[in-house]
Amino acid sequence: MRSISLFSGCGGLDIGLHEAGFRTALACDLERLCAETWRRNMPGTPFLGGRIGTWTRADVVEAMGGKIGEIDLIAGGPPCPPFSKSRFYRTDKPRALDDPNGWETVDGYLRMLEWVRPRGFILENVKGLAYRVHSDALKTIIERAEKIGYKVSTGVLNAADFGVPQIRERCFVVGALDRQIILPTPTHSRDPNTGRLPWVTAGEALADLDTEENACDEGHFAGGQHHDLLRQVPPGDNYLYFTEKRGHPAPQFKWRGRYWSFLLKLSPDMPSWTIQARRSNNMGPFHWRSRILRISEIKRLQTFPDAFDLAGTIEQQWRQIGNAVPPMLAAAVGRSVADAIGCRSGKCHHNSDFLINSPHEL
């Protein structure tokens, strides 16, 4: 089945969709570096660059070689800052669709739906899109999609509930022309009494990458001036360990006086906390060995294939992975969409360029 990828980034959503039986007929992103990452990993896929708000339908047709043809799916996640938790603290900046960039990207996505009218669509964003404060934005998306003829469903999914070794909650808006899409049922759980598989832990995911001999590689120093404090933070904890409320004998910080991710350290016995898009020496999650994670490690925590080749500097590679949808979560959503829109004869099969790291492989 043929799909168009919007805000493609390095292709995390698309790798998962390929596992579910889709093939990307066109990828799109403003960031030129992402085009190079696509060229390295999924060569031959047409790539349309530039701002989505400046595109016309003719631009899309030209990028696809003169003909769009029948498209089964449009999928993508408009950039999330206008809907993110951090925007609550940035009162100097507008939120949601009041943000010009937020409006341009969401409107551009919906215009693409109108131009192409695929059989189904997936719109992914941070959990904040589902917050009441952003209800007007979500309502706009749903109403415009319904006006085109889509039956729309929404929900928040936690990647850890689908075998991803990372607690990462994301809002999904999905729709199909023929029937309602039912978002996937979790396969994993933190609760052992559910009958589901246990969450995959960071320790399981990184076991073969985490050795004593490479634990302190040059360039992975973490904590900055607070490095000595970071070394004292227990695995799975953060700066709150050093607060009076926690009973620390020599408090260093005020309760909730910093971002929650400040000096945040992974526990090998739990999934990772959400991998952020920015590599930092004081904002985690950090490795339980008190160092910054490596690119090979965040690829594992996001369920990217080990062989996936990223373009750019370490910081640029990190941003691409941190902004991506975990392919394993994308595959679960993709299968639900494929079930709803129906597999046409000979076009629903495994055709991924890469094999996603399974929980057993991790």
Image (cartoon, rainbow, N blue to C red):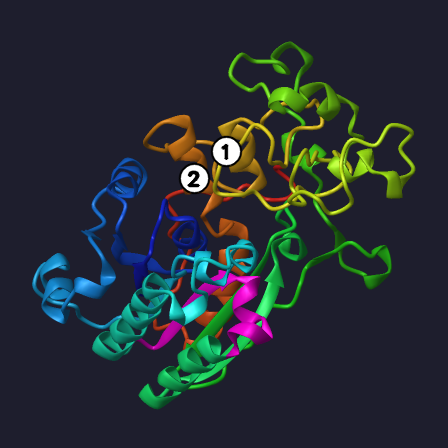
Q: Residues within 10 Å of mark 2 (few under 14, many from 20)?
A: some
Please tell me in which quadrant of the rendered image residue 242 appears.
top right
Q: Which percent across, then down, holds residue 44?
A: 20, 45
Please state if 294 lies on the left or on the right of 96 as rendered: right
Quadrant of the drawing holding the N terminus: bottom left
Instruction: Give the numbered dot on residue 319.
Output: 2
Q: Which percent across, then down, holds residue 305?
A: 47, 38
Q: Are marks 1 and 2 in contact (CB under 8 Å)?
A: yes
Mark 1, secondary structure of its residue: loop
Residue 1 appears in the figure: no
Rendered position, 210 above or below 311 = above
Rendered position, 261 above or below 109 = above
Residue furthest front in the image = 92
Residue furthest top in the image = 213
Amino acid tagged 2 = Arg
Q: Residues within 10 Å of mark 1 (few under 14, many from 20)?
A: many
Amino acid tagged 1 = Arg
Q: Earlier in the sequence, mark 1 or mark 2?
A: 1
Q: Which percent across, then down, holds residue 142?
A: 44, 82
Rendered position, 306 above or below 135 = above
Instruction: Give the numbered dot on residue 329.
Output: none
Q: Which residue is mark 1?
A: 279
The magenta region covers 118-135
Residue 121 forms part of the magenta stretch: yes
Q: Which percent across, then down, holds residue 319?
A: 43, 39
Which of the pair 7/5 is nearer the observer? 7
